[in-house]
Image (tube, rainbow, N blue to C red):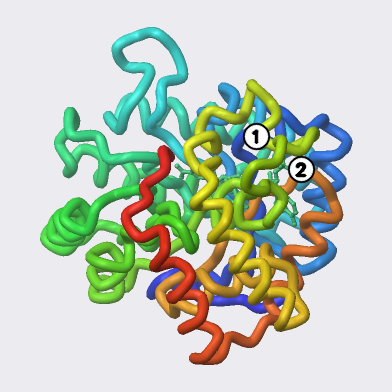
Amino acid sequence: MKYRKLGDSGLRVSEIALGSWLTYGTATERDTAIACIDRAYELGINFFDTANAYNQGAAETVVGEALRKYPRSSYVLATKVYFPMGDGPNDRGLSRKHIVEQCEASLRRLGVEYIDLYQCHRFDDTVPLEETLRALDDLVAQGKILYAGVSEWSAAQIARAKGIEEKRNLHPIISNQPIYNMLVRYIEKDVIPTCEQFGVGQVVFSPLAQGILTGKYKPGASIPQDSRAANDQTNYWIRSYLRDDVLTCVQKLEGIAKELGFTLSQLAIAWVLRQPNVSSAIIGASRVQQVEENVKALDVVLTDEVLERVEAVLKEIDGFVPIW
Ligand SMILES: NC(=O)c1ccc[n+]([C@@H]2O[C@H](COP(=O)([O-])OP(=O)(O)OC[C@H]3O[C@@H](n4cnc5c(N)ncnc54)[C@H](OP(=O)(O)O)[C@@H]3O)[C@@H](O)[C@H]2O)c1
């Protein structure tokens, strides 16, 4: 495994992280979830991502259970707050009340004394940004979280937060967690340049476009059983990728990967990690073999020639925007 610093902070995270959205606590049964987390840990993954909202706390419960047997200092545990956790008016968002209450609830479900990285799952424009940032700063001061991050914030939102932090001398936001893969690249334009300026690292999600960039979905073919797209509980977001033009392009990418002696999932993960501002790529895995295959992405060497060939293929579906 290789490790990178998370933005300008002193925290070192594995280049590949393991997430739990739609898998652990949802579609993947408990024993398999724990086996995936154990294998990831054995392979040197030290960075595990979850969220309070992933199946209303069920993902945090399984992730916490799996990691409990390891020394607390040996892994970096990330979770999030923002999406609704109840029907009440204060059961969502980034108010001080909801952040503090959900931090306590996440600590209980995870069974830990502190969260390494506590992330604002989205931006909340109904709450003063200073209220949110001060709540996070207080949690750091109390030792309940060690670092704060955000997820899917725009460049302008991150820049505003940085302005307030500096003025009020608050603990900094060290990371942003956006979608980033060969098919969704909006962060390249503004988010990455702004984050480079402010020392914020990207922890990118869905590097395999939820499994599309493994090549298992073929144009004109039926959806493989036991896949995310085949399960009505988990296929809402992946469906927008299932277009013949996109899948034809994916097959060409798979051809490039095979010529290099790798699988497409390995090429796709290496491709997001080519960006120095990306600290880690968060994969999902519904089977132990997927963890094993995906970790080998770190052996891929991307030459300029390979990158140009990938660009040429991606140009064919320029303008494609899936739901996420
Ligand atoms: N911040 C946010 O808003 C946000 C949003 C989404 C995700 N996330 C985070 O990012 C993590 C990863 O997201 P993701 O699950 O979409 O990532 P992904 O790595 O793009 O997709 C993971 C899925 O692809 C399939 N897969 C993975 N490796 C494979 C392989 N080698 N061969 C065949 N199939 C393979 C598996 O699904 P099947 O086997 O079921 O087909 C797996 O669950 C989440 O768990 C979560 O922690 C964050």
The secondary structure type at the circle numbered 1 is helix
Total of numbered circles in the picture? 2
Q: Residue at x 36, y 22 (%)?
A: 92
Quarter of the rendering containing residue 16: bottom right
The secondary structure type at the circle numbered 2 is loop
Q: Amino acid at mark 1?
A: Ala
Q: Which residue is mark 1?
A: 229
Q: Is residue 112 above or below residue 172?
A: above
Q: Residue at x 61, y 57 (%)?
A: 213
- Name the residue at the top extreme: 87
Q: Which residue is mark 2?
A: 286
Q: Is mark 1 within 8 Å of ligand 1?
A: yes
Q: Position of residue 172 (x, y in %)?
A: 31, 61
Disc nearer the start of the sequence (1/2): 1
Q: Position of residue 194 (x, y in %)?
A: 23, 68
Residue 281 seen in render: yes
